[in-house]
Amino acid sequence: MKKFINKTDDILKESLSGFATAHADLVSLNLEPNFLTRINKANNKVAIISGGGSGHEPLHAGYIGYGMLDAACPGHVFTSPTPDQMLAAAEAVHADKGILFIVKNYAGDVMNFEMAAEMLPFESATVLTSDDCAVVNSTYTTGRRGVAGTVIVEKCVGSLAETGADLQTCKALGDKVNARTASIGAALSSCTVPAAGRPTFDISETELEMGVGIHGEPGRRRETMREADAIVTDMIEAILTDFKTKDLSPTHQEALLLVNGFGATPLMELYLIYNTAAKLFAEHGIKISRSLVGNYVTALDMAGASITLCLLDDEIKQHWDSPVHTVGLRWAM
């Protein structure tokens, strides 16, 4: 293993400290327990908190700021944060309108956020993201995995919270965005967790993993490597099939297309994937009116990418387009 590391046990603390120092205009870091908050606490709004294992940067700390998260709780690499982190973060950002947790659907995250919610002295609710259509059940989750669609949920719910909407209204929008979103990923290589010191799984130069998870979990199947167009075609078919099973027809609808890199895939290749995906969706009568391409939910140093389609309506468009100011997403009207 060749990485820029001093001591494996110190990587999270040192990385978080570097992040907070580099972006001191946006975030503040608390250590022991680890959590990050907006530099200026927002008042009189639902506080939006997310978190999960580290290694998916810029998720989640990179989305702290105006129009998105109030706080994020980073666990160790690919490991859920603990309830005490969530409780401390909630106490720090609570603004008298309740706490909304946005949680990716992994067993450890779900369990620990539930424990934290039960111990909170004020009202809370949870949006569970489950956009991964590759696997229905796995040993890592309590159902469908939460992957890149989490960013879309955090952006839309964060925007709504800025308007002063109440807790249940914010939750309802998060649940709606999640239901209208589907993702699938493909990996060309494994990632290497620093504590393990070796790749999570072995894969040859002539193979790819279709439907891989963001921790390196197995996908739908191991396949022979093919041209990009053929790979993307299979990914698009999986997404369209998923919408069909949910009785949602994307035909003649506007959509947001997110092509996300897993950490080691060049932007040149991500835009190539986007080009093919946009053409294929257009052939199915889907109008791509919003786009995002880049590394937004990574898996350390994995080579691979995911495709996410979110079906838009006027409400979702409004909150996707609204101003946001974070490390990972930043735009004005």
Image: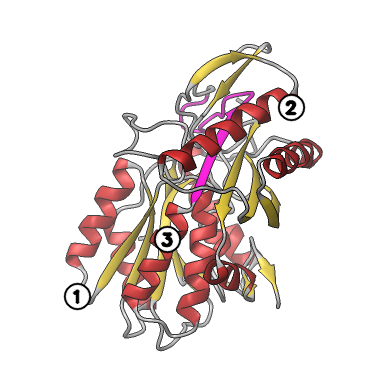
The residue identified by callout 1 is 121
Residue occupied by mark 2: 229
Is 139 situated left or right of 67 in this image?
A: left
Name the residue furthest right: 268
**Where residue 181 sits: x, y (%)?**
50, 50
The amino acid on which the numbered mark 3 sits, given as a three-letter code, is Lys
Q: Tell me where residue 81 appears, x and y as whole percent.
A: 35, 51
Q: Position of residue 47 (x, y in %)?
A: 39, 75
Q: For the magenta stretch, what is the residue range?
A: 181-197
| C-alpha separation, residue under disc 1 versus residue under disc 2 | 52 Å
- The residue at the point 49 percent across, 29 percent down is 216
The reply to whether discs 3 and 1 touch (Cβ–Cβ < 8 Å) is no
The quadrant holding residue 123 is bottom left
Residue sitting at 21 percent across and 70 percent down?
120
Task: Report the residue marked by disc 3.
Answer: 176
Q: Residue 38 location in percent, x, y?
A: 51, 74
For disc 2, the neighbor class at 10 Å (few under 14, some 14 to 19, many from 20) is some
| SS at circle 3 | helix
Question: Which comes before the other along the chain, label 2 or label 3?
Answer: 3
